[in-house]
Amino acid sequence: EAQVTQNPRYLITVTGKKLTVTCSQNMNHEYMSWYRQDPGLGLRQIYYSMNVEVTDKGDVPEGYKVSRKEKRNFPLILESPSPNQTSLYFCASRGATEAFFGQGTRLTVV
Amino acid sequence: GNSVTQMEGPVTLSEEAFLTINCTYTATGYPSLFWYVQYPGEGLQLLLKATKADDKGSNKGFEATYRKETTSFHLEKGSVQVSDSAVYFCALSDHANDYKLSFGAGTTVTVRA
């Protein structure tokens, strides 16, 4: 079954404490990306990766990092989270015909 | 740049009512157009898509037609069910960057029995 798996699903953290949200896909897709979803703004792309070791900024990259050491994994890293990064985050993996999304990670930074 | 504008919600309907969600877009060239659906507590799923002008995408009773002249891709369903309650997102990808999706703000639809 085609799957994009994110962990954790829910996370509450404090300002400044580094965190990583993991994302893994089992479809051998080259293209993966991270989005954040905020009310009234839809989904906005944070970072994307065209292949292993190839990453680039999306529309809202400030405060985030990513890495792509293996094709299946694309973790999102917040080195020093701030309250304005409280949001719902989605990882996506795109094939030739459609994108597949993870179930989301609801992050709260206090 | 690319942008997608969809009607604001929330939309509340009774079962068997007709649903339409308007979506218009701005893009260079001829983008591919999508509707994604997000059920409560889940990620986004592709509902339907259209890749060229006058194409009609359809799935699960939903339809949308790619209208180049009005730059629109309105979603319709003739008779909604309670199980259609979800957030619906219109999105596009252009051929300059075929993999990047640009999303509208989302429309929350609630169907009451």
Image: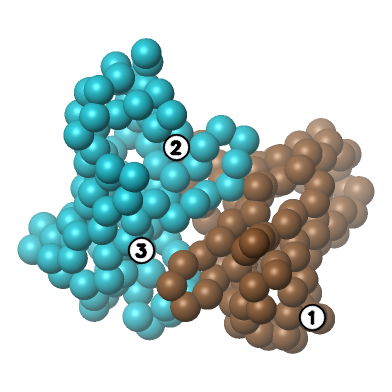
Chain colours: A brown, B cyan
**Quarter-of-image position of residue B66:** bottom left
**Quarter-of-image position of residue B13:** top left
Residue receiving disc 1: A70
Q: Mark 2 Cα within 10 Å, few/some/many (few <14, many 20+)? A: many
Residue positioned most to the left? B69
Picture quarter with the N terminus of chain B: bottom left
Residue receiving disc 3: B92
Verify CB contact (< 8 Å) between mark 2 and mark 1.
no
Name the chain letter of the residue that bears numbered label 1.
A
Q: Do pointers 3 and 1 mark residues of a single chain?
A: no
**Quarter-of-image position of residue A87:** top right
Q: Nearer the viewer, mark 3 or mark 1?
A: 1
What's under tag 1, amino acid-wise?
Glu
Task: Note whether A14 is above or below A47 in the view shown.
Answer: above
**Residue that appears at 35% across and 26% down:** B81
User: Front-most of A6 and A12?
Assistant: A6
Q: CA distance from mark 3 to mark 2?
A: 17 Å
**Residue that appears at 71% across and 45% down:** A105
Residue positioned most to the right? A17
Residue positioned most to the top? B113
Label 3 or label 2, whichever comes before in sequence order: 2
Q: CA distance from mark 3 to mark 1?
A: 28 Å
Q: Number of callouts in the render?
A: 3
Image spot of residue A92 (x, y percent): 60, 62
Residue receiving disc 2: B87
Name the chain letter of the residue that bears numbered label 2.
B
Left or right placement of residue A47 versus residue B10 in this view:
right
